[in-house]
Image (cartoon, rainbow, N blue to C red):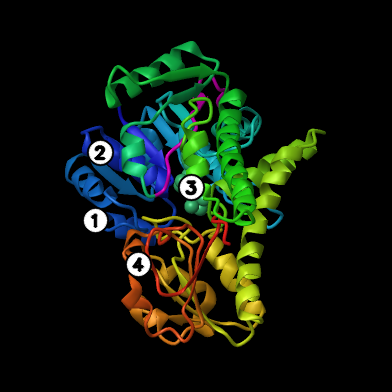
Amino acid sequence: MKVAVIGLGVVGLSFASVLGSKGFSVFGFDIDRKKIAKINSKKLPFFEPKLESFLKRALSKSFEISSDIEKTVKNCDLLFLTVGTPKSKSGFIDLTMIKNASKNIGISLRHSSKKPIIVVKSTVIPGTTTNVIRPLIEKSSRKKAGKGFEIIANPEFLREGNVINDTLKPHLVVIGGSNKNSVNRLKKFYHKLYDSKIKFMLTNTQTAEMIKYANNSFLATKISFINQISSLCQSIPGTSIDEVAEGIGTDPRIGRFFLNAGPGYGGSCLPKDLETIIQFSSKIGANPILLRAVQQINDLQIKQIIQLLEKNLGTVKNKSITILGLSFKENSDDIRESRSIELIKTLLGKKSKITVHDPKAMENTESIFKNKIIYADSILKSLDNCHCVIIMTPWKMYTKLKNNDFKNMKRKLIIDTRRILSKKCLNAEYFALGLGTD
Ligand code: UGA
């Protein structure tokens, strides 16, 4: 069975690389020729641990990449749609890329003798596979679903920074479709990719799409919940949010994952998906009170950091502030919706002087702020002469910071949003989100 992966972003490239490395015959398609050239030269277009070696193995085996959609579609029996569904200006999901891809798949199908299964992995609001993607393919292919092709919703749950492990071992494969034969064919394919213990959830397309939104909304809710409790802890001397998280996380009904308090959730998924489901709810006449509160708490996190800063520095105007960590999470160079970027924007608005450091995300950050901020190539240089340092992303290298590293700061004020230095005895004014101070 030949497989196509259409859209080589984080999800598509990881999936295709894992498939190719395991010897599946994979055709990768992307409209971005520069990206294709990079991937073909065995380089990643973004940073992701472990992915490069899987890509190399895949390219040396059975992974072929092109920008020729017709060739890709005509060759394959399974077409995975993994194009991005980013945020539009209004905050709602932007379906332009997936609509274009659907049209082009349809056109390529017109004269093809294959009857492929088109598998929608991209995150789309409930109803999109059936009401938007399917009709577009039907119109442009001049073929009917069920006759000329099949369509299935199959959302993805992998996390950036961990894509290889998540692709190799998903906790669940959700398959949404009405045609039993194609659902079984896709199941069979996944059985070949994973071992027999893999869990499946079979449902209709709109429920599959909703599972993805419910999943990301719940994760965001867990984070905002713990951040709300974290704010309370901060006002109760001696209280530690990490111990509270440990305590409640031991209850199997709650679980320990996603209870790490911090500056709020960022990234290209949780903020976008929450905003989309909120706007979608309003469109269908519902009032998503809880989800709105989740967003509000997330927005408050940056305000709390600013409050802490102003409480200690008086004004932040003309103060030199160092930000450690720019990516939205560790092990990633992705700065989309990163809380650090929001923090920098707010501080620049207040006329602070900003110096930044990150092991992977400097180039991406430079493309936003250009010469408005200073980019330090080492942690030590970033701390030189600053009035305060704020630890935003819990990169492992920041957990190793010790007293001597802060010696050249103008004022030894540390704000640790992730509490990674809380166990150290630091000769500095140390404040952390979620730790109650006396
Ligand atoms: C998220 C979901 O976790 C994936 O399951 C999903 O497939 C993906 O979105 C997607 O829709 O494509 P991702 O955006 O890679 O994955 O990142 P997460 O690991 O969910 O982290 C999101 C943000 O929450 C980060 O800023 C992280 O620092 C923050 N976070 C996470 C916390 O502040 N505390 C936690 O306990 C966990």
Disc 3 secondary structure class:
helix
Q: Which residue is mark 2?
A: 20
Instruction: Estimate how packed mark 4 is, as few (under 14), some (14 to 19) or many (20 or more) residues with alpha carbons within 10 Å.
Output: some
Magenta stretch: includes residue 70: no
Q: Please tell me which of labels 2 and 1 falls first in the chain.
A: 2
Q: CA distance from mark 2 to mark 3?
A: 41 Å
Tell me which segment is drawn in magenta: 142-160
Count residues near mark 3 (Cα–Cα under 10 Å), then give few for <14, some for 14-19, many for 20+. some
**x and y percentages locating residue 272 in the rendered image:** 61, 48
Q: Earlier in the sequence, mark 2 or mark 4?
A: 2
Where is residue 234 drawn, in percent x and y?
60, 56
Where residue 76 appears, x then y in whole percent? 35, 31
The numbered mark, 4 or 3, whose residue comes first in the sequence reads 3
Label 2 to label 4: alpha-carbon separation: 29 Å
Where is 171 relative to 124, above or below?
Answer: above
Q: Is residue 137 left or right of residue 290?
A: left
Query: What is the C-alpha distance between the residues marked 3 and 1?
Result: 41 Å
Image point (46%, 31%), residue name: 250
**Dot 1: what SS?**
loop
Mark 3 vs mark 1: in front: 3
Q: Residue at x 64, y 48 (%)?
A: 228
The amino acid beneath tag 4 is: Pro
User: x, y (%) of residue 423?
Assistant: 39, 58
Q: Main secondary structure of the magenta part?
A: loop
**Do tag 2 and tag 1 residues touch (Cβ < 8 Å)?**
no
